Amino acid sequence: MKFLLAALLLLSMPANAQDAAISQPSHAIALHGTPKYEAGFDHLDYANPNAPKGGTLKMGVVGSFDSLNPFIVKGTPAAGMNFLRSGFVYQSLMQNTWDEPFTLYGILAENIQVSPDRDWVVFNLRPEAKWADGKPVTAEDVVWTFNTLMEKGQPFFKAYYNDVKSVTAETERRVKFEFNVKGNAELPLIVAEIAILPKHFWANREFDKTSLEAPLGSGPYKVGSVEAGRSVEYVRDPNWWGKDLPFFKGFYNFDTVQYDYYRDANVALEAFLAHEYDVNIENTAKLWESAYNVPALGDGRLIKEEIENARPAGMQGFAYNIRRDVFKDEAVREALNYAFDFEWSNKQFAYGAYVRTDSYYENSELASQGLPQGDELALLQRLKAQHPDYISDSVFDTTYTNPKTDGSGNARQNLRKAMKILDDAGWTLGDDGIRSKDGIRLEFEIIDSNPQFERWVLPFIKNLERIGAKANFRVVDSAQYQNRMNDFDYDLTIAAFGQSNSPGNEQRDFWGSEKAQMQGSRNYIGITNPAIDQIIEELIVTTSREDLITHIRALDRILLAEHFVIPMWHFNKWRIAYWENIARPETLADMSPLISDTWWSSDAGNAK
């Protein structure tokens, strides 16, 4: 009888009260486990709450831009314009910390409520949250943002929010997301990361068109001066509604943040060393060792640091476009890896600083190791039984390792191995020195937008010639490169597949079959594999950290076994050089240095 009365009481409640009865509001949500920072926390550990405000931060960017709209496929957005998570101009419902695997804290949303089955989530907006024009951020803005991004935004959004059934404004400050599925632990968190847009601002504007008009946001900065393709400036709003939130204590310290664009990386570095901008993260080992030896380094005006991080390295490599006939043959993909002499190139071009990447989830506990065992083995065996043609036998009996050389530049043994693989697969050498099979020539183009890779690529091309493959390297400007990537108009490219400590729904966009032909998706390779699709869908609904790791390691093995990329390298440190007018927190976050977010101008005063 008590149970019946309780059930009747629950049914008689209004919808909002029913939600509250089964899910209490919380200031934060963790994918697995509990949030690090309890309600009422003072500030984040990697921010200095006493950092002074003021001054200007100048940053350098290589490339160009033609849009201030980062949410659509068209155009190249300016640096600083985030399309996901809180940033300079836009804020999201919640924001992740950078010292936890995947935990979000309320920003536009004061709190979050999640159903026990995780088939809906409710966000209660802060009454003080305002747009830069003073109007309140409302639940209608959230609904409009979601629907617009799904209809007119990048394909990424459709992949990321595929399981959202509906979004409803229940009151002016209460918005509810309902899902098509139950048990997707990540889905409440990823909808919380949507950068919210003002419905009233876009009422008389075309959302799916590129524009250099300063957008209206709810963030700490407004867009200042803009010179298309040359520079963009963000000016701190002293009346920003969120400046006193504990999450942002010690954040957004510069009055102005300016990004200056350079067409060439060498010119950009010269500009930095002439103090045309303030901070540079160096990604080239050779330049780090040789180019920064200037008088300013000796007298302390220029500071140069290597700072260890715990950021997953993901995968950077030569990525095959397997939509191309020449790369549909796995034997070709495997053989070409033997022509890349990483050990010699690492010595010649990087002072031996880099480590060859052996996993799509490198530098993290997510990377596959040894042979599969326990739960991981059981998972792979089940998938193999269901999809026998889509999981290689090598997944079970071979630990993936990249070919190695002695670094002398003599890679004959590896090249012989490559030629044997091609011979066995029926790729015969023609009179012109180029192999072919069934009328398809082993000939292709490698494209990238960064000329710095040329010194790595040219020796690779020489080795390819020796095994009967003809390749050329073409550097295109950043806009053309982005267009070609969006259209999958390339044979081979240098791609990076960045990963977090808690992979989930975004894996659909990297490897999902549905995205293989969707313009603008990040399935650059063109993977269509039902076993991979299934493991991603299971990954998304994992209920523990251990189960998540099991699925990611299994996915890693399948990807590696298919030889979809020729892995390049990683480096588990940040190389950061900065001028003495810029200061940083003593402790940096594990996952990002957050230069524009948590650093400050030393000219603005001394932080305690």
Image (spheres, rainbow, N blue to C red):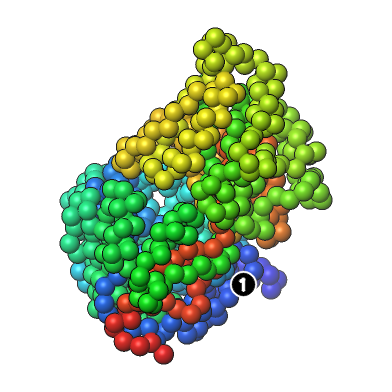
The answer to which image quadrant residue 487 occupies is top left
Look at mark 1 in the image and give the residue it sits on: 34
x, y percent for residue 43? 47, 82
Q: Residue furthest bottom?
A: 608
- Residue situated in front as seen by the camera: 605 or 124: 605
x, y percent for residue 164? 48, 50
- Residue situated in front as seen by the camera: 184 or 254: 254
Q: Amino acid at mark 1?
A: Thr
The answer to which image quadrant residue 398 occupies is top right
x, y percent for residue 214? 20, 58
- Residue situated in front as seen by the camera: 327 or 1: 327
For the C terminus, give its image quadrant: bottom left
For the N terminus, give its image quadrant: bottom right
Q: Secondary structure at mark 1?
A: loop
Examine the rendering and report whether any part of residue 114 can be seen: no
Q: Is residue 2 left or right of residue 214?
A: right
Work out whether 477 lies above or below 16.
above
Examine the rendering and report whether any part of residue 298 can be seen: yes
Q: Residue at x 63, y 41 (%)?
A: 408
Work out whether 17 lies above or below 344.
below
Q: Residue at x 40, y 59 (%)?
A: 291
Q: Residue at x 46, y 41 (%)?
A: 455
Q: Is residue 538 left or right of residue 223?
A: right
Q: Residue at x 31, y 48 (%)?
A: 264
Is disc 1 surrounded by few (<14), some (14 to 19) or many (20+) residues within 10 Å?
A: few
x, y percent for residue 225? 17, 62
